[in-house]
């Protein structure tokens, strides 16, 4: 009987975790991959969270950051698998690789020129609106390292921006955000608010 109660409690806790984090986690994934791949990634993240549920932080905000960290690794594995599949397609059937960017999307094109680590830092800071402390939690590094790497990433991005305008300072961001934030309109080309943060206002 005690085992039944423990199982019921675990299910209820996981349901609360899912309801509290799903939209933000889906938005996080949608900003980094296609819609179909994002949903696959979210499913895998929650499957991992269930298997490791004793390691999920009790604090809702910390739990969300923990899930972001898992999603980061899931998406990286997805990307490696997609690259292998595309190489196989090109080698066997001569199929061209699909375009990765929307033509005319200067910011997306500029980001694509950066190393993956720089892109992820900028996305966490400007698209996900995470603080340096939160970014440090997701990436597993110190807040000092976040500040240094983010500064370097911005400096490396600067020459690739077609406008040639200086970047604005990193915006102040809150420690937490509403869990009902919309999970649509997520690509770099569909986020004018983010572009305003990255480009200095004329």
Image (tube, rainbow, N blue to C red):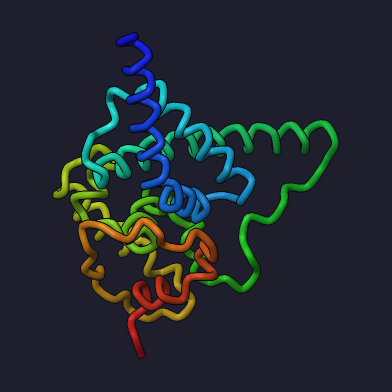
Figure check: 40 above or below 202: above
Q: Position of residue 108 (x, y in %)?
A: 52, 64
Q: Position of residue 101 (x, y in %)?
A: 61, 60
- Which residue occupies the foreground of this view, 31 or 199? 31
Q: Position of residue 62 (x, y in %)?
A: 24, 42
- Which residue occupies the foreground of this view, 59 or 117? 59
Q: Position of residue 157 (x, y in %)?
A: 39, 64
Q: Residue at the location (39% across, 62% down)?
A: 127
The furthest residue to the left: 144
The furthest residue to the bottom: 202
Is the C terminus in the top left, top right, bottom left or bottom right quadrant? bottom left
Left or right position of 85 against 11: right
Q: Residue at the location (31% across, 38% down)?
A: 66
Is the N terminus in the top left, top right, bottom left or bottom right quadrant? top left
Figure check: 184 above or below 13: below
Left or right position of 96 against 7: right
Quarter assignment of residue 142: top left
Figure check: 24 above or below 49: below
- Which residue occupies the foreground of this view, 167 or 22? 22
Q: Residue at the location (61% across, 51% down)?
A: 35
Q: Residue at the location (49% across, 76% down)?
A: 162
Q: How many marks?
A: 0
The furthest residue to the front: 1
């Amino acid at each position: 009987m005690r085992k039944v109660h423990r199982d019921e409690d675990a299910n209820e806790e996981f349901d609360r975790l899912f309801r509290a984090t799903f939209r933000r986690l889906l938005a996080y994934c949608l900003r980094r991959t296609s819609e179909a791949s994002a949903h696959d990634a979210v499913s895998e993240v929650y499957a991992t969270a269930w298997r490791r549920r004793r390691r999920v932080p009790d604090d809702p905000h910390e739990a969300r950051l923990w899930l972001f960290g898992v999603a980061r690794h899931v998406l990286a594995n997805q990307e490696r698998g997609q690259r292998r599949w595309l190489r196989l397609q090109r080698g066997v059937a001569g199929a061209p690789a699909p375009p990765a960017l929307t033509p005319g999307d200067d910011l997306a094109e500029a980001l694509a020129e950066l190393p993956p680590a720089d892109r992820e830092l900028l996305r966490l800071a400007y698209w996900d609106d995470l603080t340096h402390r939160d970014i440090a939690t997701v990436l597993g590094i110190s807040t000092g390292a976040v500040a240094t790497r983010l500064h370097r990433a911005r400096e490396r991005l600067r020459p690739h921006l077609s406008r040639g305008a200086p970047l604005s300072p990193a915006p102040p961001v809150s420690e937490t955000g509403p869990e009902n934030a919309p999970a649509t309109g997520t690509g770099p080309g569909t986020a004018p608010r983010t572009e305003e943060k990255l480009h200095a206002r004329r």
